[in-house]
Image (tube, helix red, strand yellow):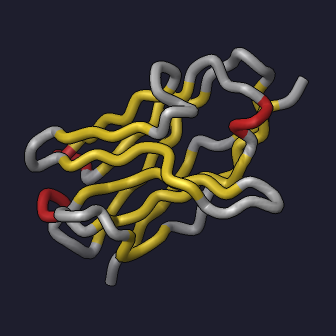
Amino acid sequence: EVHLVESGGGLVRPGGSLRLSCVASGFTFDDYAIGWFREAPGKEREGVSCIRSSDGTIWYADSVNGRFTISSDNAKNTVHLQMNNLKPEDTAVYYCAKLHNEGWAPLDWGQGTLVTVSS
């Protein structure tokens, strides 16, 4: 059974940083890409960043490019999302997803972790 467990969310002031982690189990980690998505109140879920560990391909949404960094620790089946210079508009529930390695369609989701950016 696939499990994706996110952690690291919380309350942070604008300009602050948080590091999210996604621990995966129940599948061969190297055979899939992993992505971070977010869903703000009243908005649709959107992609934030994805990583394909098999070849190191990385994608960022324009809204976070230059502020967020995704990384993969294949030995621990874990993907991190380092979020710097956070803005109030980054407030959302952040979800980790297992993605098809080609095309990056979401296949499984974690339960989400809440990030609140507020002064």
Vertically, is 49 above or below 33? above
Q: Which residue occupies 31% across, 35% down?
A: 71
Question: In which quadrant of the rendered view does residue 41 lie?
Answer: bottom right
Q: Which residue occupies 67% across, 63% down?
A: 44
Residue farthest toward the bottom in the current orientation of the protein: 1
Vertically, is 93 above or below 108? above
Query: Quick one: 27 or 86, which is closer to the camera?
Result: 86
Question: In which quadrant of the rendered view does residue 88 lie?
Answer: top right
Query: Quick one: 34 or 18, which is closer to the camera?
Result: 34
Vertically, is 96 above or below 12? below
Q: Where residue 25 appears, x then y in whole percent?
A: 30, 67
Decide if residue 63 is on the left or right side of residue 72: right
Query: Quick one: 52 or 110, which is closer to the camera?
Result: 52
Q: Where residue 116 appears, x then y in whole percent?
A: 78, 40
Question: In which quadrant of the rendered view does residue 63 lie?
Answer: top right
Q: Which residue occupies 47% across, 58% down?
A: 96
Q: Which residue occupies 34% across, 77% down?
A: 2
Decide if residue 100 is on the left or right side of residue 56: right
Residue farthest toward the right in the current orientation of the protein: 119
Q: Quadrant of the C terminus?
A: top right
Residue farthest toward the left in the current orientation of the protein: 55
Q: Where residue 82 appears, x then y in whole percent?
A: 48, 29
Decide if residue 29 is on the left or right side of residue 13: left
Q: Where residue 76 appears, x then y in whole percent?
A: 25, 48
Q: Quadrant of the N terminus?
A: bottom left
